């Protein structure tokens, strides 16, 4: 069989994705990398020739899930007579390396987040049982350069990775160790990818990065000049025909520069939604976390953003039970939440991660205290979310319709504020922006009545 025949033989690919949106994007890109080899997605691991588990290392629970999933895959591999190849990708692969193969010998390949462009070569090596089964080198630039420029996407909303890695070294976080140093893609590369998305009917692009607002990508070749900021990039993407919604995630308060804030006011395509993790409301804890800002500075940023974009929905991340956190520190977090008002927020119990400075700190907080604080914080956040959703009743919102609803004749989509919205409407609305009058709300979604469809931005 020659190499062309190999490329034509259909092979089943199943990718299980854990963790953040960056991993969702990486999984899509792995599909792009594997497509020319004849791999096509199948709907379950039991039908797959290649299973990739794209992992998350951020909290202990996420890591544990990987090993239990690998145990199940081992059984399927045995049932397949060994035909199945099992690859572990992502941040657990980066952090655990060889240890993964030792703990679960059914694993054939281990590749870190900067190595997935090497999958074809690794698969070839595995099939011949020669060479390394592990790729955890950090060469983010090489990966960016090697990725296929063309994307193959489904639906009107897509992720686009513009920056990777992190140099902030928050004391609780594994990301600087698993994703490596901060690196931005060049503006030219990003624009090529954004145009290819627009050409496939994408209307909303979410720019991704671990620290996306620290973006400083090489300026377009025709302009030369210094690196571009995220604000400049967003304004430029807004001019691409068909793209009428831009989001970015996830950002750091320290990188919320004035130009990016101004872009929220002067660029209508930038959606009125900002995810700005703050983690804690206590200056003492923020310092111990090495966040590099105070609660007052966070409030100042929010005030500036609200001045240029009144009504913007705010989202954030919180950690409770960081080492040394007292009742008073926790109360400061509750106070920050009450003062700010969030449309949605993600909150977690602090998880000790091996190799991070906070894991070695004195004053680790007992599990029951963490539990109680998490419950109190989540109750407050739920109330704010419910209230924010209820505020939309009576408003007419532009909804990007992303798919069919659960009920016959229903479709669903997303509001500018990231809320899920269900309404009765024809299926040919999918992919379009619809004007919808909101008539009902709950904690997690809105309902409404379809008014009219809107043309894509020219
Ligand atoms: N424990 C708990 N939560 C964490 N996060 C990151 N590291 C940890 C940890 N060790 C949370 C932060 C971050 C989000 C992606 O995950 O809130 O913003
Ligand atoms: Fe982790 Fe902090 Fe970097 Fe975010 S900014 S990825 S929390 S180290």
Image: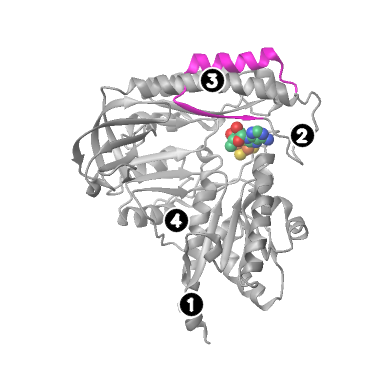
Left or right: where does residue 144 sit relative to residue 237?
A: right
Front residue of this view, candidates 303 and 278: 278
Q: Within 10 angstroms of label 1, few (less than 14), some, or many (20 or more) residues? A: some
The magenta region covers: 324-349
Give how far across and how far down residue 401 sits, in percent. Answer: 30, 43
Residue where numbered disc 1 is placed: 7
* Separation of marks 3 and 2 at Cα, in angstroms: 27 Å
Where, by quadrant of the figure, is residue 419 drawn?
top left
Residue 455 included in the magenta stretch of the image: no
Circle 4 SS class: helix
**In what quadrant does ligand 1 lie?**
top right
Q: Name the residue under label 3.
A: 379
Residue 319 circle label:
none
Q: Does the magenta stretch include residue 348?
A: yes
Q: Which of marks 4 and 1 is nearer the N terminus?
A: 1
| Residue, disc 2 | 359
């Amino acid at each position: 069989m020659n190499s062309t025949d190999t490329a034509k033989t259909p092979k089943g690919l199943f990718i299980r994705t854990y963790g953040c949106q960056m991993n969702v994007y990486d999984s899509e890109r792995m599909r792009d990398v594997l497509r020319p080899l004849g791999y096509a997605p199948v709907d379950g691991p039991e039908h797959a020739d290649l299973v990739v588990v794209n992992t998350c290392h951020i909290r202990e629970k996420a890591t544990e899930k990987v090993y239990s999933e690998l145990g199940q895959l081992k059984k399927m591999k045995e049932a397949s007579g060994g035909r199945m190849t099992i690859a572990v990708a992502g941040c657990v692969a980066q952090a655990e390396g060889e240890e993964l193969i030792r703990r679960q010998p059914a694993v054939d390949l281990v590749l870190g987040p900067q190595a997935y462009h090497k999958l074809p070569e690794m698969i070839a090596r595995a099939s011949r049982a020669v060479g390394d089964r592990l790729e955890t080198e950090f060469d983010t630039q090489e990966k960016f350069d090697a990725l296929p420029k063309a994307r193959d996407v489904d639906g009107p909303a897509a992720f686009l990775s513009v920056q990777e890695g992190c140099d902030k070294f928050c004391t609780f976080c594994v990301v600087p160790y698993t994703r490596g140093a901060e690196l931005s893609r060049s503006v030219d590369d990003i624009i090529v990818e954004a145009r290819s998305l627009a050409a496939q009917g994408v209307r909303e692009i979410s720019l991704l990065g671990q620290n996306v607002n620290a973006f400083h990508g090489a300026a377009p070749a025709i302009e030369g000049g210094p690196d571009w900021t995220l604000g400049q990039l967003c304004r430029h993407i807004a001019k691409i025909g068909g793209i009428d919604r831009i989001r970015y995630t996830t950002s750091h308060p320290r990188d919320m520069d004035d130009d990016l804030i101004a872009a929220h006011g002067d660029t209508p395509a930038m959606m009125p939604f900002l995810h700005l993790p703050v983690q804690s409301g206590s200056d003492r804890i923020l310092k111990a976390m090495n966040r590099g800002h105070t609660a007052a500075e966070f409030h100042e940023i929010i005030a500036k953003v609200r001045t240029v974009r009144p009504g913007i929905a705010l989202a954030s991340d919180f950690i409770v039970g960081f080492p040394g956190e007292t009742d008073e520190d926790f109360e400061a977090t509750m106070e920050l939440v009450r003062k700010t008002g969030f449309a949605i927020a993600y909150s977690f119990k602090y998880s000790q991660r091996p190799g991070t400075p906070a894991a070695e700190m004195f004053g680790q907080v007992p599990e029951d205290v963490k539990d109680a604080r998490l419950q109190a914080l989540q109750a407050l956040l739920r109330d704010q979310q419910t209230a924010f959703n209820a505020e939309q009743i009576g408003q007419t919102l532009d909804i990007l319709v992303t798919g069919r609803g659960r009920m016959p004749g229903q479709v669903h989509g997303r509001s500018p504020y990231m809320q899920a919205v269900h309404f009765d409407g024809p299926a040919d609305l999918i992919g379009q922006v619809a004007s919808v009058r909101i008539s009902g709300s709950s904690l997690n979604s809105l309902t409404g009545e379809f008014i009219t469809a809107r043309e894509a931005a020219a």
